Image (cartoon, helix red, strand yellow):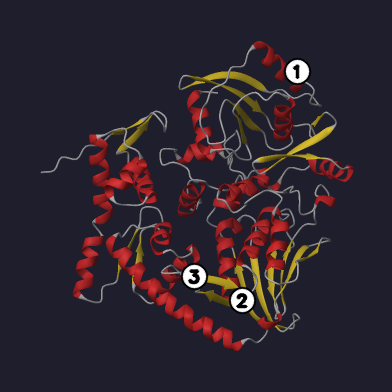
Amino acid sequence: MKANQIKSIIASGEGYHAEFKVNVPSKVRDLTEEICAFANAAGGVLLIGVNDSNEIKGVIVDNSKRSAIQDSISEISPQLNCSFEIVNVEGLDVAVIEVPAGTNKPYVYSGAIYVRVGPNSQKLTTSEQMFDFFQQSGKLYFDEATCNTFNAETEIDEGNFINFRVEAGFLPDISDNQIRQNLHLFTSDGFIKRGAVLFFGAHPESFYEQAIIRCVAFRGKNKRFISDDKTYGGPLFHQYISTMEWLRGKLNVGYDIEGQGGGPRKEVWEIPETVFKEAIVNSLSHRDYYEKGAVTTIELFDDRVEISNPGELLAAVGKDFGHKSVSRNPLIFGLFQRIHLVEKVGSGILRMKQLMLGNHLQAPIYQKEGMFTVIFNRPVAAVAEETLEKTVEESMEKTMEKTSDKIIELITNNSEITIFEMVEFIGVSQRSIERNLKQLQSDNRIERIGADKGGHWIIISKSFKEKNLLDTSEKTSEKTSEKILDLIEKNSSITIPELAKKIGATSRTIERQLYKLQKENKIKRTGSDKSGHWQILLLYIQV
């Protein structure tokens, strides 16, 4: 492995396919357990000499340590062939152990099976867990198999991929190809994996019709009368956002204005919003996509909400339900973890219970046979609570009006402003911004020109003043790029925080502009993030 490949992996951080150790542990078996877990999953890379903050510290691996590591790896059964090398990266040695995806699973070390779950490794301790893994080991993970008919050049949702880059914290100088390689979205022979199609494809349901969420609202406590029925497809993150918005529109949502000062009012859902976030991400990550006869469903009744998922609870979880997590789709689970929608592996069940009880609600009820279902009982007051609904509706209308005005002002000043930047400036949730943008477009007050990537907003002018403001806003992005080029020309080692401070913009704005300038081949990053510098490839001559 070359130094630039290692730097790219480090920049991407730890995850399902990467593990960092700052030094060789006193018990080398700790390394071997990680290696065994990689082999039982989809392979990975273990870097020694890198800390948890993605900083290269270097390591000295003498002959005795090297022999101890290799002897320990040889204890894995069946035999596993791993490459072990020392690579000099920026003047420091990093030990690199590359682990292939095992072809003879399960792999056992010291009588135990280790598996990879998100960015962590877990030990299977009970006979039930091991038996289930033996059954599953002959099966290829759905999300690791390839989708040979998908065209990655034309069918990736570029806007969704850019948002993923930002939310995952990838630096602008890391190319899209590097990210795709580091996340193992493609096989070694160049085919895209199903998990990547589900997470980044514009219309994954065109390839896997079962990859949708159906949201159904019923009048009453049974399924006799349907009042609303929606189906959501698209990238899995979009399905998550759409489902949360649907729930927000159906459940009672109040506002806590006490102690908020001048900030935005805090939404208070009748069932905590975080409960649904956990449940929906779990559904999208752990559902059995091999099952073509069923889809994930959200069913809303007067007295409860039921979320059902194809696939029974894996026996590998067994008695540790709520404490351990084993995913059917580790690639998808790892991608959700990258954008921080998975807080701590194996903690979601307990967190949902604590949130429900903490809000004087019944603990969630789980049905684990056949379709896996979680039931959240609504508070009694949620049934036919017309007064609260009216208050919430009026408050939401006023809030949306104020938020819309602020959005218009921000677009006027910067036509290329992103949703995430609007969230930072206004101080409301991403969902609130998206809802207001949709309403503004419906009211013909704004319009989106171009694609999500590289496009911009325009205000449909209603006055001479607005027209003048619009003319100004269209030049803002260009001026920002020019300021960045000017500052780089003066100081090629300038950092993103320094650029943001000098220009008066957010770090995300700077990152987006740097990414755009690199894609346009106007600038290039040379060297590492810490000691490298920028290089201008195209100079402008003003006549």
Q: Which mark is residue 71?
A: 1
Percent position (x, y) of residue 51? 56, 32
Compute the Cα span from label 2 to label 1: 58 Å
* In the displayed structure image, the side of residue 276 where residue 5 appears, left or right: left
* Residue picked out by circle 3: 259
Decide which of 327, 201 is in the foreground and name it.
Answer: 327
Q: Nearer the viewer, mark 3 or mark 2?
A: 3
**For marks 3 and 2 on the same chain, the one whose residue lies earlier in the sequence:** 2
Q: Are marks 3 and 2 in contact (CB under 8 Å)?
A: no
Percent position (x, y) of residue 397? 45, 80
At mark 2, the secondary structure is loop
* In the displayed structure image, the side of residue 121 where residue 433 appears, left or right: left
Decide which of 371, 511 is in the foreground and name it.
Answer: 511
Query: Which class describes the residues within 10 Å of circle 3: few (<14), some (14-19), or many (20+)?
Result: few
Q: Amino acid at mark 1?
A: Asp
* Residue picked out by circle 2: 251
Q: Amino acid at mark 2?
A: Leu
Percent position (x, y) of residue 424? 41, 58
Compute the Cα span from label 3 to label 1: 61 Å
Residue 519 in sight in this render: no
Q: Amino acid at mark 3?
A: Gly
Query: Which class describes the residues within 10 Å of circle 2: few (<14), some (14-19), or many (20+)?
Result: some
Q: Which quarter of the rendered picture does the C terminus lie within?
A: top left
Residue 509 in sight in this render: yes
Q: Which quarter of the rendered picture does the N terminus lie within?
A: top right
